[in-house]
């Protein structure tokens, strides 16, 4: 065995799959369809060319990641796999429109709050704004950027009544094209 090759690392592999499917399918020679799916065999071939691990990555490894990750980031269907949210590629992934819960949450850094209050929540480098189903999750999301994140409460009920469209990411993540300031309330400053 080549000593430099590593044992399978599912967290690292999951991150690499997210990177490929959300941000850079072309780097992995993947054709991505309108819903974000790529062919599993194409993805495996490309990952295995990198020759990182001490064995080949197989379909069951992808299934393991999908079924055992802390979050439902990816979905497998009919020999294809996709990221459920997080995309930044130019061609917008089409997502299923649905009516969200009355309230959703967004965790962010304090330094962004003034801009968000003025301009609303914008997708920034991604295709959609990402919203969380509960405050706990929003705090975790916000902590990626600020030890004391600010939690925003989104009045989805009013937004839906006014015609704002929401999309399903997964069971805990909702997506939106943008959230105008009038539906945003500062819920919790965790400091
Ligand atoms: C902020 C992770 C200034 C926004 C997470 C956020 C999530 C503004 C940042 C998912 C703004 C964008 C996405 C405005 C928004 N002015 N700043 N008008 N509007 N922002 O990473 O929601 O673990 O693109 O508040 O858990 O943090 O990778 O979005 O701070 O579910 O699966 O601009 O990614 O999931 O940051 O995270 P991001 P996000 P994974």
Image: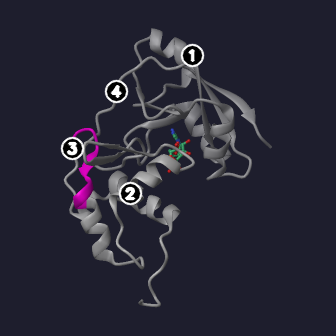
- Decide: is 77 above or below 134: below
Crowding at label 1, few (<14), some or many (≥20) Cα neighbours within 10 Å? few
> For the residue with label 2, is its CB less than 8 Å from the closest atom of ligand 1?
no
- Which residue is depicted at the point 45% across and 58% down? 14
User: Which of these two is toward me, 153 or 30?
Assistant: 30
- The residue indicated by pointer 3 is 33
Q: Which mark is residue 102?
A: 1
User: In the picture, residue 177 is in which quadrant?
Assistant: top left
Q: CA distance from mark 3 to mark 2?
A: 22 Å
Residue 66 placement, left or right of 184: left
- The residue indicated by pointer 4 is 96
Q: Which residues are magenta?
A: 34-42
Q: CA distance from mark 1 to mark 3?
A: 31 Å
Residue furthest to the right: 191
Q: Judge depth for marks 1 and 3 and give the one in front.
A: 3
- The residue indicated by pointer 2 is 60
* Magenta residue check for 135: no
Which one is earlier in the sequence, the residue at label 3 or at label 2? 3
């Amino acid at each position: 065995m080549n000593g430099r090759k590593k044992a399978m690392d599912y967290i690292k592999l999951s991150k690499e799959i997210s990177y490929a499917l959300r941000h850079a399918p072309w780097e992995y020679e993947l054709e991505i369809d309108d819903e974000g799916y790529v062919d599993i065999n194409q993805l495996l071939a490309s990952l295995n060319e990198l020759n990182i691990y001490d064995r080949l990555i197989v379909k069951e490894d992808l299934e393991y990641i999908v079924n055992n990750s802390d979050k439902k980031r990816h979905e497998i269907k009919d020999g294809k796999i996709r990221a459920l949210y997080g995309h930044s590629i130019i061609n917008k992934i089409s997502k299923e429109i649905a009516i969200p819960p009355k309230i959703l949450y967004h965790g962010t850094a304090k330094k962004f709050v003034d801009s968000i209050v003025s301009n609303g929540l914008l997708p920034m480098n991604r295709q959609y704004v990402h919203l969380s189903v509960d405050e706990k999750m929003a705090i975790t999301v916000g902590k990626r950027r600020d030890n004391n994140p600010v939690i925003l409460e989104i009045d989805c009920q009013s937004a839906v009544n006014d015609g704002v469209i929401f999309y399903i990411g997964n069971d805990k993540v909702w997506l939106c094209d943008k959230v105008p300031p009038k539906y945003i309330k500062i819920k919790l400053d965790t400091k």
